[in-house]
Amino acid sequence: MPPRTSAEEHRKYFPGNMIYLGEGPAWQNILVEIHHRNPVEQTLLIPAVAEPQLIWQISGHLLCSDRDLGGEWNTHEVVPGDLFLTTSAEPYELKWKAITKDPSVVMHVTIGLHFLARAAKELAGPSARIPRLKEFSAIRDATILSFLEMLRRELSEQKTASSSFVQGIAQSLATHLIRTYRDDENPRPHRSSALPAFQLHRVLKLMDASLDEGVNVGKLAAAIQMSEAHFSRLFKGNTGFPPSQYFIRLRVSKAQELLRGTMKPIIEVGMDIGYTSPSHFAHVFRKETGLSPHEYRERTMGKEPTDDFSRIATG
């Protein structure tokens, strides 16, 4: 598991089913998702993301535990209306168990640094940086809930979301968080060391479309009008990997999907993701997974546990 990942890839570390996803121009710089969670999950290792993340427990009553890696478990009941804010740059562990039979439905909202930077400048002057925000767990905040409910309705009830409406709520939410939850005891500012959500989304789509051809980091940087060095640094801030290494992992993830879900010959699987040399494909696959493609297929067909990077794949 990478120590950090993008907001879009983060969902793949939480088992369950996505019900709604905000996509299109209205949702630039804010990622809004609604998920149905499994009633029981054993310990999950969750990577960090660059942006603050809000979670709203819409329905379901859970006993939930979380901890920093190697730390003590913090256990608490989670009921509908509870809110969580995660801002840590470090991964953490999470587990839960449903207390009632009500379905567990949650909304995840990742707030783009663009909104937080604008709010910081409006509140503290043009040279202000994004302040640290205090994390919170299972609290109630009527203002946040009202904003999230408006986003929920726009996402689930409107055929086409209004850009001005969604962007206005996102900016208001960012302003409220900085006003109310800025961490004055640890005032070190949050550095914008990651790509904005809309730029990251474009880059990941370009990578996903280029699995069989290969990708040029310079062209990815040019697509979002950045220098290659600056782009590579910010991309690593989102994902924990340089662009070239992340692309290799995406290729291996796709190969794993094909090895598990099809009976294609291994040489064809390699060619599908851009490796014309079977030996080179096998070398890269083994380096990333610890297994040869043949061993991986044998183990997954036999349902033996394997390290699986498929959760980082786009799409």
Image (cartoon, rainbow, N blue to C red):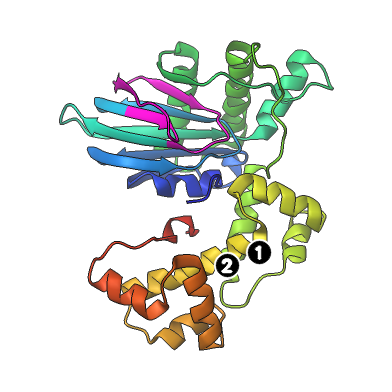
Q: Position of residue 42 (x, y in %)?
A: 27, 41
| Rendered view: 54 above or below 233 | above
Q: Position of residue 240 (x, y in %)?
A: 60, 49
Specify whether 226 is left or right of 302: right
Please tell me which residue is depicted at 66% across the width and 45% down the height of the picture. Answer: 237
Between residue 261 and residue 152, name the one nearer to us: 261
- Extent of the magenta region: 65-92
Total count of labels: 2
Between residue 188 and residue 238, name the one nearer to us: 188
Residue 272 visible at all: no
Kind of residue at disc 1: Ser
Specify whether 151 is left or right of 119: left
In this figure, which residue is indicated by the disc labeled 1? 244
Please identify the residue farthest to the left as the structure is shown.
101
Q: Position of residue 301 (x, y in %)?
A: 25, 73
Q: Position of residue 186 (x, y in %)?
A: 65, 16
Does dot 1 land on a helix, a strand or a loop?
helix
In this figure, which residue is indicated by the disc labeled 2? 248
For the residues bearing labels 1 and 2, Cβ distance under 8 angstroms = yes
